[in-house]
Image (spheres, coloured by chain):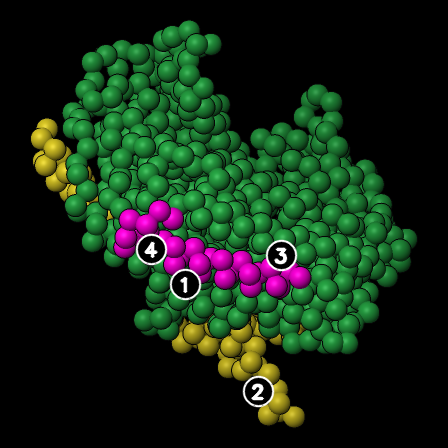
């Protein structure tokens, strides 16, 4: 191959690779990205059943209930506007508690959010970014109630 | 005075870096001989940053609480090694470490590099100084590690307990060394583009740095991966977390660069391509630093969100990467084309390697940043996780691993030897592996099965470059390549096994009760409280057996007294088990159970285990105290200083 052609071939190959990466990524992202919802979004019907999603909110006081097997728990996440029941089988983070923020990863199944994983606010200094606004709103709401 | 000495050294180093840039301009605009003074300045700058960093270590070692960084991230009760490691377990300290390594790398280049032309060297050192200047500015104006507190508080707030781990002592420094090693490749590329001396000599000067950086990145990623594996709740060895991706992206680019630079060194070909990769590799390091330091993405790694610093880093990133790309566009086209090669040749093999790595890099990059794009454009929040990366990048990685077995057998320029005939044995091993997985584990997924198959092929094929000759007379470089490629096969087999054979069981167990998980019988033997210097723990003992002698597992849950953070759980063994003390659960879920409950969920089966828990009233009273204290601390104590800037923890701390 002549040097000049060789360079052309290499540039073409690089471009093809670039486009391929972008296409693959776009197709994959369309199918696999999971959206973040609040209970209000769920109530508005934004989440479709069975599709991976994240749900964030405050754990409603008095809603946590544990099944007899000791490892399955049910609770309700709320954003002040709506409530979504959540089911989770596994060990919740140590800082998971009523009245505190939590994010559930999983999917909606006939009105209940089935979580594979629960993320909780894990120390005084940090919160998942999605929950930042929510916590602020929640606090504002509380102050108004008072 | 120690802190002030450090700050002064930092200012002086910044001044020298500015002088170095001035010398570079002089070297490029006229034929003034500047290389010698430049070497001296670069070495002095490296020494000064080293002094600054040593001062930071010293204030941490002495627990000088009048330095606000020490107050926010250390505690006098900490074991000594974590006091020292705490110096880089926070934002300011880790940025100082970054710039120290950057300047020392510059000093090493100045001291040892004799291979490139003097003008290129001067330009490369100048480029390194420009990089350093940005980070000096960042430290001095936006994140001063030596800021004082007055009056000095009596004791510090403590390091996040998750960081009180040997992992912290090694994982960030190795990764940083890797990142910064790539900065040298970047500077050489910029220097060579400026002078136009892109040739085999340059490649040979760059190569040790790229190789070193690649090794350190590999070690750093492996160390982090192992840390995440035994620390429960971090999602196992690899989670496709944005911050993990931030270290993977430079690694992918460095791997591509390591291969293409050999083509440049051996054949003088792929000039523009290699320069491009050198720029991309360091850009990825900067992107990684930005992602980690700005806290812009949701991550299992925790950071306080500080928009100002994020913006500063983003501006640095944009300036450096933008300038490098403009330089490349301006000078890249004028590079002379290198030696030609045939379609089937080692060069072509390496091009294919580079293209595949680049595609994987693109996929990881887009997947990692996609949530940012979407949120900026539509205000919708979403996250991209393992399903995307596994499905899109996984198959490509397998194709790449397959080609890794073939590429090294090709010869330069034009293929003369019949390559396929050499591959008989690997092909047999490959088919064997496939048949075995079908017989032994008919139910596993496609990707793990393909993983086993490709791993089998590569295990055999990676040794071929040594098989055709006397292995003891083969060059060390060949040995290095064979070991690295063999390592890919081993890693691939491990990942496939983890994906295929993990089993998990959640259950509540009584003391002395045995549970079965897959082929394993796991018995909960005992639950004991233990204590360390600044923590208390509950340690479970489990005995796992599978026919032969039992393996003992000692998972533990730790509570740190001096840090406002959640408890952490460690697997205690490569076989996973977890102790979950529900008695300490503030939700009071378990009032209908008597006393303390331990839940021991397990992980794998290859490296197996389980789940269990106990009811034993006496234990509860003993553990009630540390647990409660921990939560009181959480609820009642707030940082007296606004935590915004103090809170970011350099590495891990979000426990999923």
* Residue that appears at 64% across and 48% down: B168
Mark 4 and mark 3: span between their CA atoms? Answer: 29 Å
Q: Mark 1 or mark 3: which comes first in sequence?
A: 3
Q: Is residue B107 above or below residue A79?
A: above
* Residue that appears at 83% across and 41% down: B526
Q: Which residue is mark 2?
A: A141
- The one nearer the camera, B404 or B41, is B41
Q: Which residue is mark 1?
A: B316
* Residue that appears at 71% across and 67% down: B67
Mark 2 and mark 4: span between their CA atoms? Answer: 63 Å
Q: Which residue is mark 3?
A: B52
As helix, strand or loop, the secondary structure at mark 4 comes to helix
- The one nearer the camera, B96 or B48, is B48
Q: Is residue B441 above or below residue B328?
A: above
Q: Which residue is mark 4?
A: B26
What tint does the image give chain B?
green
Span highlighted in magenta in the image? B5-34
Which class describes the residues within 10 Å of circle 1: few (<14), some (14-19), or many (20+)? Answer: some
Q: Which chain is yellow?
A: A
Does residue B16 belong to the magenta stretch?
yes
Is residue B1 something that shows in the picture?
Answer: yes
As helix, strand or loop, the secondary structure at mark 1 comes to helix
Q: Nearer the viewer, mark 1 or mark 3?
A: 3
The C terminus of chain B sits in image quarter: bottom right
- The subunit carrying tag 4 is B
- The subunit carrying tag 1 is B
Q: Say if labels 4 and 1 share a chain.
A: yes
Q: Is residue B223 above or below residue B5?
A: above
Q: Mark 4 or mark 3: which comes first in sequence?
A: 4
The N terminus of chain B sits in image quarter: bottom right
């Amino acid at each position: 191959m002549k040097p000049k052609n060789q360079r052309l071939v290499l540039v073409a190959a690089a471009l093809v690779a670039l486009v391929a990466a972008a296409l693959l990524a776009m197709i994959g992202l369309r199918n696999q990205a999971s959206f973040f919802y609040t209970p209000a979004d769920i109530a508005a019907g934004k989440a479709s059943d069975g599709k991976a999603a994240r749900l964030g909110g405050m754990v409603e006081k008095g809603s946590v209930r544990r099944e007899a097997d000791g490892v399955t728990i049910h609770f309700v996440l709320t954003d002040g506007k709506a409530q979504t029941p959540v089911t989770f089988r596994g060990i919740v983070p140590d800082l998971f508690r009523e009245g505190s923020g939590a994010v559930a990863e999983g999917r909606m199944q006939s009105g209940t959010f089935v979580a594979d994983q629960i993320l909780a606010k894990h120390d005084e200094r940090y919160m998942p970014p999605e929950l930042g606004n929510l916590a602020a709103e929640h606090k504002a709401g509380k102050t108004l109630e008072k | 005075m120690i802190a002030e000495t450090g700050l002064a050294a930092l200012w002086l180093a910044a001044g020298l870096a500015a002088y170095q840039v001035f010398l570079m301009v002089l070297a490029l605009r006229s034929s003034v001989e500047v290389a010698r003074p430049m070497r001296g300045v670069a070495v002095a700058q490296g020494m000064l940053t080293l002094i600054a960093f040593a001062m930071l270590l010293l204030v941490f070692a002495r627990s000088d609480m009048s330095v606000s960084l020490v107050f926010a991230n250390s505690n006098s009760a900490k074991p000594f090694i974590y006091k020292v490691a705490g110096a880089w377990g926070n934002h300011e300290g880790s940025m100082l470490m970054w710039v120290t390594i950057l300047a020392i790398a510059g000093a090493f280049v100045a001291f040892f590099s004799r291979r490139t032309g003097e003008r290129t060297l001067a330009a490369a050192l100048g480029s390194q100084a420009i990089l350093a200047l940005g980070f000096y500015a960042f430290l001095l104006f936006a994140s001063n590690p030596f800021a004082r507190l007055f009056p000095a508080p009596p004791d510090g707030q403590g390091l996040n307990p998750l960081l009180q781990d040997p992992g912290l002592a090694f994982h960030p420094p190795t990764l940083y060394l890797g990142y910064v090693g790539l900065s040298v490749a970047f500077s050489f590329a910029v220097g060579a583009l400026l002078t136009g001396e892109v040739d085999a000599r340059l490649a040979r000067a760059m190569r040790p740095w790229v190789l070193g950086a690649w090794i350190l990145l590999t070690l750093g990623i492996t160390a982090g991966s192992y840390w995440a594996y035994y620390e429960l709740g971090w999602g196992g060895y690899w989670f496709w977390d944005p911050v993990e991706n931030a270290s993977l992206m430079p690694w992918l680019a460095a791997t591509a660069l390591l291969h293409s630079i050999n083509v440049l060194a051996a054949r003088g070909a792929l000039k523009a391509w290699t320069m491009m990769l050198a720029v991309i590799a360091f850009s990825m390091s900067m992107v990684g630093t930005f992602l980690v330091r700005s806290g812009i993405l949701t991550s299992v790694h925790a950071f306080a969100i500080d928009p100002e610093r994020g913006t500063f880093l983003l501006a640095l990133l944009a300036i450096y990467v933008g300038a490098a790309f403009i330089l490349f566009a301006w000078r890249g086209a004028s590079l002379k084309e290198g030696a030609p090669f045939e379609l089937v040749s080692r060069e072509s093999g390496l091009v294919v390697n580079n293209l595949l790595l680049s595609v994987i890099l693109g996929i990881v990059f887009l997947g990692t940043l996609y949530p940012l794009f979407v949120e900026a454009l539509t205000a919708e929040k979403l996250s991209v996780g393992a399903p995307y990366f596994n499905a899109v990048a996984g198959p490509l990685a397998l194709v790449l691993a397959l080609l890794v077995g073939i590429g090294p057998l090709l010869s330069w320029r034009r293929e003369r030897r019949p390559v396929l005939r050499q591959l008989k044995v690997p092909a047999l091993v490959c088919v064997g592996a496939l048949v075995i997985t079908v017989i032994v584990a008919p139910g596993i997924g496609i990707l793990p099965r393909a993983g086993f198959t490709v791993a089998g092929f590569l295990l055999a094929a990676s040794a071929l470059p040594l098989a055709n000759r006397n292995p003891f007379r083969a060059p060390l470089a060949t040995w290095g390549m064979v070991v690295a490629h063999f390592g890919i096969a081993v890693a691939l087999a491990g990942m496939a096994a983890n994906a295929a054979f993990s089993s998990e069981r959640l259950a509540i167990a009584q003391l002395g009760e045995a549970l079965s998980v897959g082929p394993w019988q796991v018995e909960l033997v005992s639950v004991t409280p233990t204590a360390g210097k600044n923590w208390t723990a509950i340690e479970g003992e489990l005995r796992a057996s599978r026919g032969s002698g039992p393996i003992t597992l000692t998972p533990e849950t730790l509570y740190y007294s001096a840090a406002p953070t959640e408890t952490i759980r460690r697997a205690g063994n490569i076989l996973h088990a977890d102790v979950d003390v529900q008695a300490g659960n503030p939700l009071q879920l378990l009032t209908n159970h008597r006393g303390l409950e331990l839940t021991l969920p397990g992980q794998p089966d290859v490296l197996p285990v389980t789940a269990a828990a106990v009811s034993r009233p006496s234990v509860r009273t003993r553990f009630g105290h540390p647990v409660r204290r921990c939560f009181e601390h959480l609820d009642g104590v707030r940082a007296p200083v606004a935590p915004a800037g103090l809170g970011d923890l350099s590495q891990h701390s979000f426990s999923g």
